[in-house]
Amino acid sequence: MKKIVLLVAIIAVMFSYSCLNRCDVDCVNPPSPLWLKVVDKTTLQNLIAEGFYHRDTIKIYYFDGATKKYANIYYVGPVGQNDIIQTNIAILLPFEQLNTFYLYLNQYDTDTILVRYVKSSDGCCTAYPLDSIAINGKYVDVDNVDYSFLIKK
């Protein structure tokens, strides 16, 4: 009987210890930046690289109540070609809900971007993967080479 009680006690301690110390460290993986590429709908040529849209006019903004706020954007891409818009809009508004951003290309062309990031945790690490994205209310294609989202014009 003593052996059974001792065995049960050892098993209970092992389970409680493994549940308490499941992870060596806590980690958080922030949302990945979005890559957006503005392309011609038939030829898929990059319209920023072709000079149709100019980098100095492109902005991404959102509304915080009645206040218009701007997101940081950077231009990335293959060596010698910085024509993909990179932004980390996910960190600007709440997770778990659909958020609206606007991609201002010029005075005649503004696109609406709807994104939702969700919180995902395995007990040790927390991540914020992209759950959904729509541009102008439509499904977004992904470039198979650089994995940017294609905004077709």
Image (cartoon, rainbow, N blue to C red):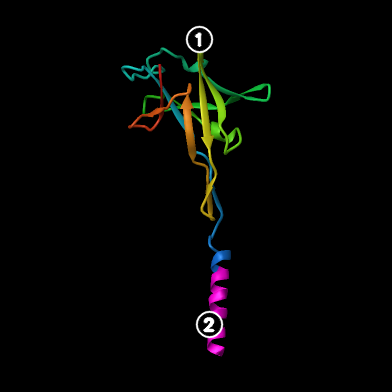
Q: Residue at x 53, y 37 (%)?
A: 117
Q: Which residue is mark 2?
A: 7
SS at mark 2?
Answer: helix
Range of residues picked out in magenta: 1-17
- Between the residue at mark 2 and the residue at mark 1, the CA separation in whole angstroms equals 75 Å
Q: As drawn, which residue projects farthest toward the bottom? A: 1
In which quadrant of the rendered image does the N terminus lie? bottom right
Above or below, 28 relative to 142: below
Q: Residue at x 49, y 27 (%)?
A: 74
In which quadrant of the rendered image does the C terminus lie? top left
- Of residues 58 and 119, the one nearer the viewer is 119
Kind of residue at disc 1:
Tyr
Would residue 121 be counted in the magenta stretch?
no
Q: Is disc 1 surrounded by few (<14), some (14 to 19) or many (20+) residues within 10 Å?
A: few
Q: Which dot, 2 or 1, sits closer to the camera?
A: 2
Above or below, 19 relative to 130: below
Kind of residue at disc 2:
Leu
Above or below, 34 relative to 14: above
Q: Residue at x 47, y 31 (%)?
A: 133
